[in-house]
Amino acid sequence: MSARAADLSDRARDLFSAEQQRICDELSRLDGSKQFQTDEWLRAGGGGGLTRILADGHLFEKAGVNTSAVWGELDDIALKKLGGSERDFFAAGLSLVLHPRSPMVPTLHANFRYLRRGASAWFGGGSDLTPYYPYREDVVEFHGAWKAVCDRHDVTYYPRFKKWCDEYFYIPHRGEARGVGGIFFDDLAGDLEKGFAFVADCCRNVLAPYIVIAERRRHEPYTEEERRFQFFRRGRYVEFNLIYDRGTSFGLATQGRVESILMSLPPLAGWWYAYEPQPHSREAAAMQYFQPQDWL
Amino acid sequence: MSARAADLSDRARDLFSAEQQRICDELSRLDGSKQFQTDEWLRAGGGGGLTRILADGHLFEKAGVNTSAVWGELDDIALKKLGGSERDFFAAGLSLVLHPRSPMVPTLHANFRYLRRGASAWFGGGSDLTPYYPYREDVVEFHGAWKAVCDRHDVTYYPRFKKWCDEYFYIPHRGEARGVGGIFFDDLAGDLEKGFAFVADCCRNVLAPYIVIAERRRHEPYTEEERRFQFFRRGRYVEFNLIYDRGTSFGLATQGRVESILMSLPPLAGWWYAYEPQPHSREAAAMQYFQPQDWL
Protein backbone atom coordinates (compact mmCIF):
# COMPACT_ATOMS: atom_id res chain seq x y z
CA MET A 1 0.00 0.00 0.00
CA SER A 2 1.47 3.40 -0.93
CA ALA A 3 1.63 6.12 1.73
CA ARG A 4 -0.76 8.22 -0.35
CA ALA A 5 -3.42 5.52 -0.55
CA ALA A 6 -3.07 4.94 3.18
CA ASP A 7 -3.62 8.63 3.77
CA LEU A 8 -6.87 8.64 1.84
CA SER A 9 -8.11 5.56 3.68
CA ASP A 10 -7.74 7.32 7.00
CA ARG A 11 -9.17 10.58 5.73
CA ALA A 12 -12.17 8.86 4.12
CA ARG A 13 -12.91 6.96 7.32
CA ASP A 14 -12.60 10.13 9.40
CA LEU A 15 -14.85 12.02 7.00
CA PHE A 16 -17.57 9.36 7.13
CA SER A 17 -17.41 9.14 10.94
CA ALA A 18 -17.69 12.88 11.42
CA GLU A 19 -20.51 13.15 8.89
CA GLN A 20 -22.38 10.25 10.50
CA GLN A 21 -22.44 12.13 13.80
CA ARG A 22 -23.53 15.39 12.19
CA ILE A 23 -26.21 13.68 10.05
CA CYS A 24 -27.66 11.81 13.04
CA ASP A 25 -27.80 15.04 15.06
CA GLU A 26 -29.63 16.79 12.22
CA LEU A 27 -32.05 13.93 11.68
CA SER A 28 -32.83 13.65 15.35
CA ARG A 29 -33.65 17.38 15.45
CA LEU A 30 -35.73 17.02 12.31
CA ASP A 31 -37.63 14.07 13.76
CA GLY A 32 -38.26 15.99 16.94
CA SER A 33 -39.03 13.01 19.16
CA LYS A 34 -36.31 10.37 19.22
CA GLN A 35 -32.56 9.82 19.42
CA PHE A 36 -30.48 7.30 17.49
CA GLN A 37 -29.46 4.08 19.16
CA THR A 38 -25.91 2.95 18.39
CA ASP A 39 -24.45 -0.48 17.78
CA GLU A 40 -20.73 -0.97 17.26
CA TRP A 41 -19.55 -4.14 15.58
CA LEU A 42 -16.20 -5.68 14.75
CA ARG A 43 -15.26 -7.70 11.70
CA ALA A 44 -13.17 -10.82 12.37
CA GLY A 45 -10.88 -10.17 9.37
CA GLY A 46 -10.23 -6.50 10.25
CA GLY A 47 -12.21 -3.34 10.92
CA GLY A 48 -15.85 -2.90 11.84
CA GLY A 49 -18.64 -0.38 11.86
CA LEU A 50 -21.11 1.78 13.70
CA THR A 51 -24.83 1.26 13.00
CA ARG A 52 -27.17 4.01 14.16
CA ILE A 53 -30.95 3.60 14.05
CA LEU A 54 -33.86 5.84 14.98
CA ALA A 55 -37.13 3.89 15.15
CA ASP A 56 -40.76 4.92 15.72
CA GLY A 57 -40.14 8.66 15.65
CA HIS A 58 -42.57 11.41 14.76
CA LEU A 59 -41.24 11.88 11.25
CA PHE A 60 -39.28 8.65 10.78
CA GLU A 61 -40.76 5.22 11.12
CA LYS A 62 -37.19 3.94 10.65
CA ALA A 63 -34.01 5.85 9.88
CA GLY A 64 -30.60 4.24 9.63
CA VAL A 65 -27.18 5.87 9.28
CA ASN A 66 -24.27 3.42 9.09
CA THR A 67 -20.54 3.69 8.73
CA SER A 68 -18.03 0.92 8.29
CA ALA A 69 -14.31 0.66 7.63
CA VAL A 70 -13.07 -2.84 6.85
CA TRP A 71 -9.82 -4.19 5.50
CA GLY A 72 -7.79 -7.33 5.08
CA GLU A 73 -7.67 -10.09 2.47
CA LEU A 74 -10.68 -10.91 0.29
CA ASP A 75 -11.78 -14.51 0.77
CA ASP A 76 -12.67 -16.87 -2.11
CA ILE A 77 -16.38 -15.98 -2.11
CA ALA A 78 -15.65 -12.26 -2.35
CA LEU A 79 -12.99 -12.86 -5.01
CA LYS A 80 -15.44 -14.86 -7.09
CA LYS A 81 -18.07 -12.10 -6.81
CA LEU A 82 -15.64 -9.29 -7.64
CA GLY A 83 -13.37 -11.02 -10.18
CA GLY A 84 -9.60 -10.46 -10.43
CA SER A 85 -6.93 -11.97 -8.20
CA GLU A 86 -5.89 -9.06 -5.92
CA ARG A 87 -6.95 -9.86 -2.34
CA ASP A 88 -5.61 -6.92 -0.30
CA PHE A 89 -8.40 -4.36 0.24
CA PHE A 90 -9.71 -1.45 2.29
CA ALA A 91 -13.30 -0.17 2.17
CA ALA A 92 -14.88 2.67 4.11
CA GLY A 93 -18.43 3.88 3.65
CA LEU A 94 -21.35 5.89 4.92
CA SER A 95 -24.96 4.76 4.16
CA LEU A 96 -28.25 6.24 5.10
CA VAL A 97 -31.83 5.17 4.49
CA LEU A 98 -34.76 7.22 5.81
CA HIS A 99 -38.22 5.66 5.88
CA PRO A 100 -40.70 8.35 7.00
CA ARG A 101 -44.07 7.40 8.43
CA SER A 102 -46.14 9.73 6.23
CA PRO A 103 -46.64 8.60 2.63
CA MET A 104 -46.46 12.27 1.65
CA VAL A 105 -42.77 12.39 2.66
CA PRO A 106 -40.34 10.51 0.39
CA THR A 107 -37.81 7.85 1.34
CA LEU A 108 -34.18 8.91 1.02
CA HIS A 109 -31.17 6.74 0.34
CA ALA A 110 -27.54 7.77 0.13
CA ASN A 111 -24.25 5.91 0.19
CA PHE A 112 -20.67 7.15 -0.20
CA ARG A 113 -17.65 4.92 -0.17
CA TYR A 114 -13.89 4.79 -0.66
CA LEU A 115 -12.40 1.53 -1.90
CA ARG A 116 -8.87 0.38 -2.37
CA ARG A 117 -7.86 -2.94 -3.87
CA GLY A 118 -4.14 -3.52 -4.21
CA ALA A 119 -2.77 -0.35 -5.78
CA SER A 120 -6.12 0.85 -7.23
CA ALA A 121 -8.39 3.17 -5.30
CA TRP A 122 -11.63 4.94 -6.13
CA PHE A 123 -14.71 6.63 -4.71
CA GLY A 124 -18.29 5.63 -5.32
CA GLY A 125 -21.65 6.77 -4.08
CA GLY A 126 -24.82 8.67 -4.75
CA SER A 127 -28.18 9.65 -3.37
CA ASP A 128 -31.66 8.93 -4.70
CA LEU A 129 -35.21 9.79 -3.71
CA THR A 130 -38.26 7.52 -3.58
CA PRO A 131 -41.48 9.52 -3.24
CA TYR A 132 -44.84 7.80 -2.72
CA TYR A 133 -47.03 10.66 -3.94
CA PRO A 134 -46.12 12.90 -6.87
CA TYR A 135 -44.98 16.45 -6.04
CA ARG A 136 -43.02 17.73 -8.99
CA GLU A 137 -41.47 20.60 -7.03
CA ASP A 138 -39.96 18.10 -4.56
CA VAL A 139 -38.31 16.08 -7.32
CA VAL A 140 -37.00 19.26 -8.95
CA GLU A 141 -35.69 20.44 -5.54
CA PHE A 142 -33.82 17.18 -5.13
CA HIS A 143 -32.30 17.01 -8.62
CA GLY A 144 -31.52 20.74 -8.59
CA ALA A 145 -29.61 20.42 -5.33
CA TRP A 146 -27.52 17.51 -6.65
CA LYS A 147 -26.84 19.27 -9.92
CA ALA A 148 -25.52 22.24 -7.94
CA VAL A 149 -23.22 20.04 -5.84
CA CYS A 150 -21.98 18.21 -8.97
CA ASP A 151 -21.44 21.40 -10.98
CA ARG A 152 -19.14 22.85 -8.30
CA HIS A 153 -16.72 20.00 -9.04
CA ASP A 154 -17.20 18.95 -12.65
CA VAL A 155 -19.96 19.94 -15.07
CA THR A 156 -19.90 16.47 -16.63
CA TYR A 157 -20.85 14.82 -13.29
CA TYR A 158 -24.58 15.55 -13.05
CA PRO A 159 -25.59 14.38 -16.55
CA ARG A 160 -23.44 11.22 -16.24
CA PHE A 161 -24.34 10.39 -12.66
CA LYS A 162 -28.04 11.14 -13.13
CA LYS A 163 -28.19 8.68 -16.05
CA TRP A 164 -26.17 6.11 -14.12
CA CYS A 165 -28.62 6.41 -11.22
CA ASP A 166 -31.60 5.82 -13.51
CA GLU A 167 -29.88 2.73 -14.89
CA TYR A 168 -28.82 1.36 -11.52
CA PHE A 169 -32.06 1.82 -9.54
CA TYR A 170 -34.17 0.03 -12.11
CA ILE A 171 -36.38 -3.02 -11.45
CA PRO A 172 -36.28 -5.01 -14.72
CA HIS A 173 -39.06 -7.48 -13.82
CA ARG A 174 -41.42 -4.53 -13.11
CA GLY A 175 -40.20 -2.27 -15.91
CA GLU A 176 -40.08 0.51 -13.29
CA ALA A 177 -37.47 2.68 -11.60
CA ARG A 178 -37.24 2.30 -7.80
CA GLY A 179 -37.90 6.00 -7.35
CA VAL A 180 -37.13 9.26 -9.14
CA GLY A 181 -33.36 8.79 -9.11
CA GLY A 182 -30.73 11.34 -8.22
CA ILE A 183 -27.03 10.62 -8.76
CA PHE A 184 -24.97 7.41 -8.73
CA PHE A 185 -21.27 6.88 -9.49
CA ASP A 186 -18.93 4.01 -8.95
CA ASP A 187 -15.59 4.82 -10.57
CA LEU A 188 -14.12 8.09 -9.33
CA ALA A 189 -10.49 7.07 -9.72
CA GLY A 190 -7.53 9.03 -11.11
CA ASP A 191 -7.39 12.32 -9.22
CA LEU A 192 -8.33 11.08 -5.77
CA GLU A 193 -8.04 14.52 -4.19
CA LYS A 194 -10.71 15.74 -6.57
CA GLY A 195 -12.80 12.66 -5.70
CA PHE A 196 -12.35 13.26 -1.98
CA ALA A 197 -13.39 16.91 -2.29
CA PHE A 198 -16.50 15.91 -4.25
CA VAL A 199 -17.53 13.14 -1.86
CA ALA A 200 -16.95 15.40 1.15
CA ASP A 201 -19.20 18.03 -0.45
CA CYS A 202 -21.84 15.35 -1.16
CA CYS A 203 -21.81 14.23 2.48
CA ARG A 204 -22.11 17.78 3.78
CA ASN A 205 -25.13 18.43 1.54
CA VAL A 206 -26.81 15.03 1.65
CA LEU A 207 -29.68 16.20 3.87
CA ALA A 208 -30.16 19.72 2.49
CA PRO A 209 -32.82 19.06 -0.18
CA TYR A 210 -34.46 16.35 1.93
CA ILE A 211 -35.02 18.70 4.87
CA VAL A 212 -36.75 21.21 2.58
CA ILE A 213 -38.99 18.47 1.16
CA ALA A 214 -39.75 16.84 4.52
CA GLU A 215 -40.65 20.15 6.18
CA ARG A 216 -42.88 20.97 3.21
CA ARG A 217 -44.80 17.65 3.39
CA ARG A 218 -44.70 16.40 6.95
CA HIS A 219 -47.93 18.05 8.07
CA GLU A 220 -50.02 17.06 5.05
CA PRO A 221 -52.91 14.82 6.10
CA TYR A 222 -53.13 11.31 4.67
CA THR A 223 -55.62 8.46 4.66
CA GLU A 224 -55.38 4.76 5.45
CA GLU A 225 -55.63 4.13 1.70
CA GLU A 226 -52.63 6.38 1.09
CA ARG A 227 -50.70 4.59 3.81
CA ARG A 228 -51.55 1.33 2.04
CA PHE A 229 -50.17 2.71 -1.22
CA GLN A 230 -46.96 3.50 0.67
CA PHE A 231 -46.78 -0.16 1.82
CA PHE A 232 -47.32 -1.31 -1.76
CA ARG A 233 -44.55 0.96 -3.09
CA ARG A 234 -42.25 -0.11 -0.26
CA GLY A 235 -42.72 -3.65 -1.59
CA ARG A 236 -40.95 -2.51 -4.77
CA TYR A 237 -38.17 -1.09 -2.60
CA VAL A 238 -37.75 -4.50 -0.97
CA GLU A 239 -37.75 -6.24 -4.37
CA PHE A 240 -34.99 -3.97 -5.65
CA ASN A 241 -32.83 -4.21 -2.54
CA LEU A 242 -33.04 -7.99 -2.11
CA ILE A 243 -32.83 -8.97 -5.79
CA TYR A 244 -30.70 -6.34 -7.54
CA ASP A 245 -28.75 -4.16 -5.13
CA ARG A 246 -25.09 -5.11 -5.50
CA GLY A 247 -24.09 -3.88 -2.05
CA THR A 248 -26.81 -5.95 -0.37
CA SER A 249 -26.06 -9.16 -2.24
CA PHE A 250 -22.29 -8.74 -1.79
CA GLY A 251 -22.77 -8.02 1.91
CA LEU A 252 -25.03 -11.03 2.53
CA ALA A 253 -22.87 -13.41 0.45
CA THR A 254 -19.69 -12.36 2.26
CA GLN A 255 -21.18 -12.65 5.74
CA GLY A 256 -21.41 -8.95 6.48
CA ARG A 257 -23.42 -7.86 9.53
CA VAL A 258 -26.95 -8.76 8.44
CA GLU A 259 -28.85 -6.24 10.58
CA SER A 260 -26.64 -3.39 9.34
CA ILE A 261 -27.03 -4.42 5.68
CA LEU A 262 -30.79 -4.90 5.92
CA MET A 263 -31.47 -1.70 7.87
CA SER A 264 -32.39 -0.42 4.37
CA LEU A 265 -35.61 -2.47 4.37
CA PRO A 266 -38.82 -0.65 5.27
CA PRO A 267 -40.56 -1.27 8.61
CA LEU A 268 -43.76 -2.40 6.82
CA ALA A 269 -44.30 -3.38 3.20
CA GLY A 270 -47.10 -5.15 1.39
CA TRP A 271 -47.82 -7.23 -1.67
CA TRP A 272 -51.35 -7.33 -3.02
CA TYR A 273 -52.00 -9.38 -6.10
CA ALA A 274 -52.16 -7.43 -9.37
CA TYR A 275 -52.73 -4.09 -7.65
CA GLU A 276 -53.62 -1.35 -10.15
CA PRO A 277 -54.33 2.25 -9.13
CA GLN A 278 -57.68 3.76 -10.14
CA PRO A 279 -57.47 5.63 -13.45
CA HIS A 280 -56.79 9.38 -12.99
CA SER A 281 -56.04 8.92 -9.26
CA ARG A 282 -53.01 10.39 -7.50
CA GLU A 283 -51.66 6.85 -7.25
CA ALA A 284 -51.91 6.44 -11.03
CA ALA A 285 -50.09 9.76 -11.43
CA ALA A 286 -47.41 8.57 -9.00
CA MET A 287 -46.73 5.45 -11.06
CA GLN A 288 -45.77 7.70 -14.00
CA TYR A 289 -42.92 9.06 -11.87
CA PHE A 290 -41.20 5.68 -11.86
CA GLN A 291 -40.08 5.93 -15.44
CA PRO A 292 -36.69 7.65 -15.81
CA GLN A 293 -37.10 11.21 -17.11
CA ASP A 294 -35.40 14.60 -17.24
CA TRP A 295 -36.60 16.50 -14.14
CA LEU A 296 -34.77 19.81 -14.53
CA MET B 1 -40.17 -36.21 -28.15
CA SER B 2 -41.22 -39.83 -27.52
CA ALA B 3 -44.92 -40.68 -27.47
CA ARG B 4 -44.61 -41.74 -23.84
CA ALA B 5 -43.12 -38.42 -22.69
CA ALA B 6 -45.84 -36.59 -24.62
CA ASP B 7 -48.44 -38.66 -22.79
CA LEU B 8 -47.09 -37.66 -19.39
CA SER B 9 -47.02 -33.97 -20.34
CA ASP B 10 -50.74 -34.03 -21.07
CA ARG B 11 -51.57 -36.16 -18.05
CA ALA B 12 -49.50 -33.95 -15.73
CA ARG B 13 -51.18 -30.82 -17.05
CA ASP B 14 -54.63 -32.36 -16.67
CA LEU B 15 -53.84 -33.53 -13.15
CA PHE B 16 -52.68 -30.07 -12.07
CA SER B 17 -55.71 -28.38 -13.63
CA ALA B 18 -58.20 -30.71 -11.98
CA GLU B 19 -56.43 -30.43 -8.63
CA GLN B 20 -56.33 -26.64 -8.86
CA GLN B 21 -60.10 -26.54 -9.17
CA ARG B 22 -60.64 -28.98 -6.31
CA ILE B 23 -58.12 -27.19 -4.05
CA CYS B 24 -59.70 -23.78 -4.70
CA ASP B 25 -63.14 -25.17 -3.91
CA GLU B 26 -61.88 -26.63 -0.64
CA LEU B 27 -60.02 -23.46 0.33
CA SER B 28 -62.99 -21.28 -0.42
CA ARG B 29 -65.18 -23.48 1.81
CA LEU B 30 -62.50 -23.40 4.51
CA ASP B 31 -62.22 -19.61 4.32
CA GLY B 32 -65.98 -19.28 4.54
CA SER B 33 -66.26 -15.76 3.11
CA LYS B 34 -64.66 -15.36 -0.28
CA GLN B 35 -64.26 -16.93 -3.71
CA PHE B 36 -61.13 -17.09 -5.84
CA GLN B 37 -60.66 -14.61 -8.65
CA THR B 38 -59.16 -16.07 -11.82
CA ASP B 39 -56.65 -14.67 -14.30
CA GLU B 40 -55.67 -16.60 -17.39
CA TRP B 41 -52.46 -15.65 -19.15
CA LEU B 42 -50.71 -16.77 -22.31
CA ARG B 43 -46.97 -17.11 -22.88
CA ALA B 44 -45.68 -15.73 -26.18
CA GLY B 45 -43.36 -18.72 -26.76
CA GLY B 46 -46.06 -21.36 -26.04
CA GLY B 47 -48.49 -22.26 -23.28
CA GLY B 48 -49.79 -20.19 -20.39
CA GLY B 49 -51.36 -20.44 -17.00
CA LEU B 50 -54.25 -19.87 -14.65
CA THR B 51 -53.65 -17.76 -11.53
CA ARG B 52 -56.30 -17.94 -8.82
CA ILE B 53 -56.24 -15.62 -5.82
CA LEU B 54 -58.47 -15.25 -2.78
CA ALA B 55 -57.78 -11.97 -0.95
CA ASP B 56 -59.05 -10.47 2.33
CA GLY B 57 -61.01 -13.52 3.40
CA HIS B 58 -61.98 -14.56 6.94
CA LEU B 59 -59.21 -17.12 7.26
CA PHE B 60 -56.90 -16.10 4.43
CA GLU B 61 -55.40 -12.66 4.08
CA LYS B 62 -54.06 -13.91 0.73
CA ALA B 63 -54.25 -17.36 -0.84
CA GLY B 64 -52.91 -18.17 -4.28
CA VAL B 65 -53.26 -21.37 -6.31
CA ASN B 66 -51.53 -21.27 -9.70
CA THR B 67 -51.14 -23.68 -12.57
CA SER B 68 -49.07 -23.24 -15.70
CA ALA B 69 -48.10 -25.38 -18.66
CA VAL B 70 -45.45 -23.86 -20.91
CA TRP B 71 -43.35 -25.25 -23.73
CA GLY B 72 -41.11 -24.30 -26.61
CA GLU B 73 -37.42 -23.49 -26.95
CA LEU B 74 -35.36 -22.16 -24.03
CA ASP B 75 -33.86 -18.74 -24.82
CA ASP B 76 -30.24 -17.80 -24.07
CA ILE B 77 -31.00 -16.40 -20.60
CA ALA B 78 -32.80 -19.59 -19.54
CA LEU B 79 -30.06 -21.75 -21.07
CA LYS B 80 -27.40 -19.86 -19.13
CA LYS B 81 -29.35 -20.30 -15.88
CA LEU B 82 -30.02 -24.00 -16.43
CA GLY B 83 -26.78 -25.08 -18.16
CA GLY B 84 -26.61 -27.66 -20.96
CA SER B 85 -27.43 -27.09 -24.60
CA GLU B 86 -30.86 -28.76 -25.05
CA ARG B 87 -33.47 -26.10 -25.78
CA ASP B 88 -36.70 -28.06 -26.35
CA PHE B 89 -38.75 -28.14 -23.13
CA PHE B 90 -42.15 -28.64 -21.51
CA ALA B 91 -43.02 -27.64 -17.94
CA ALA B 92 -46.31 -28.00 -16.09
CA GLY B 93 -46.82 -27.12 -12.45
CA LEU B 94 -49.20 -26.43 -9.60
CA SER B 95 -48.23 -23.97 -6.83
CA LEU B 96 -50.03 -22.82 -3.77
CA VAL B 97 -49.21 -20.36 -1.02
CA LEU B 98 -51.63 -19.67 1.82
CA HIS B 99 -51.09 -16.60 4.02
CA PRO B 100 -53.69 -16.71 6.81
CA ARG B 101 -54.60 -13.56 8.72
CA SER B 102 -54.20 -15.04 12.20
CA PRO B 103 -50.61 -15.48 13.41
CA MET B 104 -51.83 -18.64 15.17
CA VAL B 105 -52.43 -20.33 11.79
CA PRO B 106 -49.33 -21.28 9.78
CA THR B 107 -48.48 -20.34 6.20
CA LEU B 108 -48.55 -23.25 3.75
CA HIS B 109 -46.56 -23.61 0.55
CA ALA B 110 -46.69 -26.46 -1.96
CA ASN B 111 -45.49 -26.88 -5.51
CA PHE B 112 -45.59 -29.90 -7.82
CA ARG B 113 -44.16 -29.92 -11.32
CA TYR B 114 -43.41 -32.09 -14.32
CA LEU B 115 -40.49 -31.12 -16.50
CA ARG B 116 -39.19 -32.42 -19.78
CA ARG B 117 -36.06 -31.20 -21.50
CA GLY B 118 -35.21 -32.97 -24.75
CA ALA B 119 -35.53 -36.68 -23.98
CA SER B 120 -35.23 -36.32 -20.16
CA ALA B 121 -38.27 -35.94 -17.97
CA TRP B 122 -38.77 -35.77 -14.21
CA PHE B 123 -41.10 -34.71 -11.42
CA GLY B 124 -40.30 -32.27 -8.65
CA GLY B 125 -42.21 -30.72 -5.81
CA GLY B 126 -42.92 -30.64 -2.12
CA SER B 127 -44.84 -28.93 0.61
CA ASP B 128 -43.60 -27.06 3.66
CA LEU B 129 -45.15 -25.31 6.64
CA THR B 130 -44.22 -21.94 8.17
CA PRO B 131 -45.85 -21.47 11.57
CA TYR B 132 -45.59 -18.19 13.46
CA TYR B 133 -46.30 -19.56 16.93
CA PRO B 134 -45.01 -22.90 18.15
CA TYR B 135 -47.56 -25.72 18.42
CA ARG B 136 -45.68 -28.97 18.39
CA GLU B 137 -48.78 -31.06 17.63
CA ASP B 138 -49.33 -29.03 14.43
CA VAL B 139 -45.82 -29.66 13.18
CA VAL B 140 -46.12 -33.36 14.02
CA GLU B 141 -49.50 -33.49 12.24
CA PHE B 142 -47.92 -32.00 9.12
CA HIS B 143 -44.82 -34.18 9.02
CA GLY B 144 -46.83 -37.30 9.95
CA ALA B 145 -49.23 -36.73 7.07
CA TRP B 146 -46.39 -36.32 4.56
CA LYS B 147 -44.59 -39.37 5.91
CA ALA B 148 -47.76 -41.39 5.38
CA VAL B 149 -48.12 -40.17 1.77
CA CYS B 150 -44.44 -40.88 1.06
CA ASP B 151 -44.47 -44.33 2.68
CA ARG B 152 -47.33 -45.48 0.44
CA HIS B 153 -44.97 -45.07 -2.54
CA ASP B 154 -41.42 -45.59 -1.31
CA VAL B 155 -40.16 -45.82 2.27
CA THR B 156 -36.95 -44.02 1.29
CA TYR B 157 -38.89 -40.91 0.21
CA TYR B 158 -39.76 -39.28 3.53
CA PRO B 159 -36.28 -39.35 5.12
CA ARG B 160 -34.65 -38.15 1.85
CA PHE B 161 -37.23 -35.52 1.00
CA LYS B 162 -37.53 -34.22 4.57
CA LYS B 163 -33.77 -33.64 4.69
CA TRP B 164 -33.81 -32.07 1.23
CA CYS B 165 -36.57 -29.70 2.36
CA ASP B 166 -34.54 -28.62 5.41
CA GLU B 167 -31.59 -27.93 3.14
CA TYR B 168 -33.57 -26.09 0.48
CA PHE B 169 -35.69 -23.80 2.68
CA TYR B 170 -32.72 -22.44 4.59
CA ILE B 171 -31.75 -18.76 4.88
CA PRO B 172 -27.93 -18.77 5.11
CA HIS B 173 -27.52 -15.09 6.04
CA ARG B 174 -29.87 -15.61 9.02
CA GLY B 175 -28.70 -19.11 9.95
CA GLU B 176 -32.42 -20.06 10.12
CA ALA B 177 -34.84 -22.33 8.27
CA ARG B 178 -37.77 -20.56 6.59
CA GLY B 179 -40.25 -22.68 8.53
CA VAL B 180 -40.48 -26.19 9.94
CA GLY B 181 -39.97 -27.92 6.59
CA GLY B 182 -41.93 -30.82 5.17
CA ILE B 183 -40.81 -32.54 1.97
CA PHE B 184 -38.93 -31.36 -1.14
CA PHE B 185 -37.73 -33.32 -4.17
CA ASP B 186 -36.41 -32.31 -7.55
CA ASP B 187 -35.28 -35.40 -9.39
CA LEU B 188 -38.02 -38.03 -9.65
CA ALA B 189 -36.86 -39.46 -12.97
CA GLY B 190 -36.58 -43.08 -14.15
CA ASP B 191 -39.93 -44.76 -13.51
CA LEU B 192 -42.19 -41.83 -14.47
CA GLU B 193 -45.39 -43.81 -13.80
CA LYS B 194 -44.26 -44.25 -10.21
CA GLY B 195 -43.45 -40.53 -10.11
CA PHE B 196 -46.85 -39.63 -11.53
CA ALA B 197 -48.68 -41.79 -9.00
CA PHE B 198 -46.71 -40.22 -6.14
CA VAL B 199 -47.25 -36.63 -7.31
CA ALA B 200 -50.97 -37.29 -7.89
CA ASP B 201 -51.24 -38.63 -4.34
CA CYS B 202 -49.36 -35.56 -3.03
CA CYS B 203 -51.78 -33.21 -4.81
CA ARG B 204 -54.84 -35.05 -3.49
CA ASN B 205 -53.53 -34.82 0.08
CA VAL B 206 -51.89 -31.42 0.01
CA LEU B 207 -54.58 -29.73 2.11
CA ALA B 208 -55.41 -32.59 4.47
CA PRO B 209 -53.00 -31.80 7.36
CA TYR B 210 -53.40 -28.06 6.82
CA ILE B 211 -57.16 -28.17 7.25
CA VAL B 212 -56.77 -30.01 10.57
CA ILE B 213 -54.25 -27.41 11.77
CA ALA B 214 -56.19 -24.39 10.51
CA GLU B 215 -59.46 -25.57 12.10
CA ARG B 216 -57.60 -26.19 15.35
CA ARG B 217 -56.06 -22.68 15.48
CA ARG B 218 -58.34 -20.32 13.60
CA HIS B 219 -60.41 -19.24 16.59
CA GLU B 220 -57.51 -18.68 18.99
CA PRO B 221 -57.37 -15.03 20.06
CA TYR B 222 -54.28 -13.01 19.26
CA THR B 223 -52.89 -9.59 20.12
CA GLU B 224 -51.48 -6.72 18.03
CA GLU B 225 -48.04 -7.71 19.31
CA GLU B 226 -48.55 -11.26 17.99
CA ARG B 227 -49.68 -9.88 14.66
CA ARG B 228 -46.49 -7.80 14.61
CA PHE B 229 -44.44 -10.96 15.20
CA GLN B 230 -46.21 -12.47 12.19
CA PHE B 231 -45.14 -9.46 10.06
CA PHE B 232 -41.57 -9.86 11.29
CA ARG B 233 -41.51 -13.57 10.44
CA ARG B 234 -43.11 -12.88 7.06
CA GLY B 235 -40.09 -10.63 6.42
CA ARG B 236 -37.94 -13.77 6.57
CA TYR B 237 -40.32 -15.41 4.07
CA VAL B 238 -39.77 -12.49 1.69
CA GLU B 239 -35.99 -12.68 2.15
CA PHE B 240 -35.97 -16.37 1.27
CA ASN B 241 -38.27 -16.05 -1.73
CA LEU B 242 -36.56 -13.04 -3.30
CA ILE B 243 -32.96 -14.02 -2.61
CA TYR B 244 -32.78 -17.82 -2.65
CA ASP B 245 -35.85 -19.44 -4.19
CA ARG B 246 -34.77 -20.91 -7.52
CA GLY B 247 -38.24 -20.88 -9.05
CA THR B 248 -38.69 -17.20 -8.25
CA SER B 249 -35.31 -16.09 -9.59
CA PHE B 250 -35.66 -18.27 -12.70
CA GLY B 251 -39.17 -16.93 -13.31
CA LEU B 252 -38.18 -13.28 -12.92
CA ALA B 253 -35.00 -13.62 -15.01
CA THR B 254 -36.86 -15.35 -17.85
CA GLN B 255 -39.71 -12.83 -17.97
CA GLY B 256 -42.36 -15.06 -16.47
CA ARG B 257 -45.65 -13.45 -15.39
CA VAL B 258 -44.49 -11.34 -12.44
CA GLU B 259 -47.79 -11.18 -10.55
CA SER B 260 -48.16 -14.97 -10.72
CA ILE B 261 -44.59 -15.58 -9.55
CA LEU B 262 -44.78 -13.06 -6.70
CA MET B 263 -48.22 -14.16 -5.46
CA SER B 264 -46.08 -16.07 -2.91
CA LEU B 265 -45.17 -12.84 -1.10
CA PRO B 266 -47.16 -12.01 2.03
CA PRO B 267 -49.72 -9.18 2.03
CA LEU B 268 -47.85 -7.36 4.83
CA ALA B 269 -44.34 -7.93 6.17
CA GLY B 270 -42.06 -5.88 8.38
CA TRP B 271 -38.42 -5.30 9.16
CA TRP B 272 -37.48 -3.85 12.54
CA TYR B 273 -33.84 -3.33 13.29
CA ALA B 274 -32.19 -6.02 15.41
CA TYR B 275 -35.50 -7.39 16.71
CA GLU B 276 -35.00 -9.93 19.49
CA PRO B 277 -37.88 -11.70 21.23
CA GLN B 278 -38.13 -11.37 25.03
CA PRO B 279 -36.39 -14.23 26.83
CA HIS B 280 -38.77 -17.11 27.72
CA SER B 281 -41.56 -15.61 25.57
CA ARG B 282 -43.63 -17.59 23.06
CA GLU B 283 -41.78 -15.68 20.33
CA ALA B 284 -38.44 -16.84 21.70
CA ALA B 285 -39.79 -20.41 21.74
CA ALA B 286 -40.97 -20.00 18.15
CA MET B 287 -37.49 -18.99 16.97
CA GLN B 288 -36.21 -22.38 18.19
CA TYR B 289 -38.50 -24.02 15.62
CA PHE B 290 -36.54 -22.53 12.75
CA GLN B 291 -33.61 -24.85 13.21
CA PRO B 292 -34.01 -28.10 11.23
CA GLN B 293 -34.91 -30.98 13.54
CA ASP B 294 -36.53 -34.42 13.62
CA TRP B 295 -40.23 -33.80 14.33
CA LEU B 296 -41.61 -37.34 14.36
Image (cartoon, coloured by chain):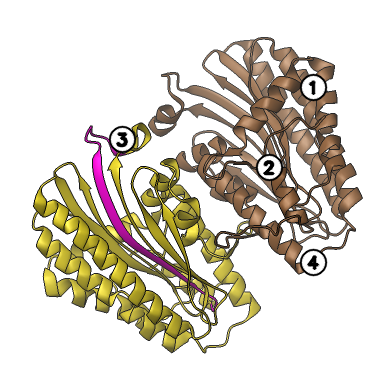
Chain colours: A brown, B yellow
Q: In terms of depth relative to the viewer, which is nearer, B231 or A12?
A: B231
At 75% from the left and 28% from the top, the residue drawn is A15
- Percent position (x, y) of residue A137? 87, 40
- Amino acid type at circle 4 is Thr
Q: Magenta residues, as a range?
A: B82-102
Kindly indicate whether the residues beneath marks 2 and 1 are on one polypeptide chain.
yes
Q: Chain of mark 1?
A: A
Label 2 Cα neighbours within 10 Å, binned few <14 / some 14-19 / many ≥20: many
Which of the labelled discs sits on residue A223, or is there none?
4
Label 4 Cα neighbours within 10 Å, binned few <14 / some 14-19 / many ≥20: few
Question: Does B85 appear in magenta?
Answer: yes
Which of the labelled discs sits on residue B79, or is there none?
3
- Amino acid type at circle 3 is Leu
Please say whether residue B175 is visible from this viewpoint.
no
Among numbered discs 2 and 4, the one appearing first in the sequence: 4
Label 1 Cα neighbours within 10 Å, binned few <14 / some 14-19 / many ≥20: many
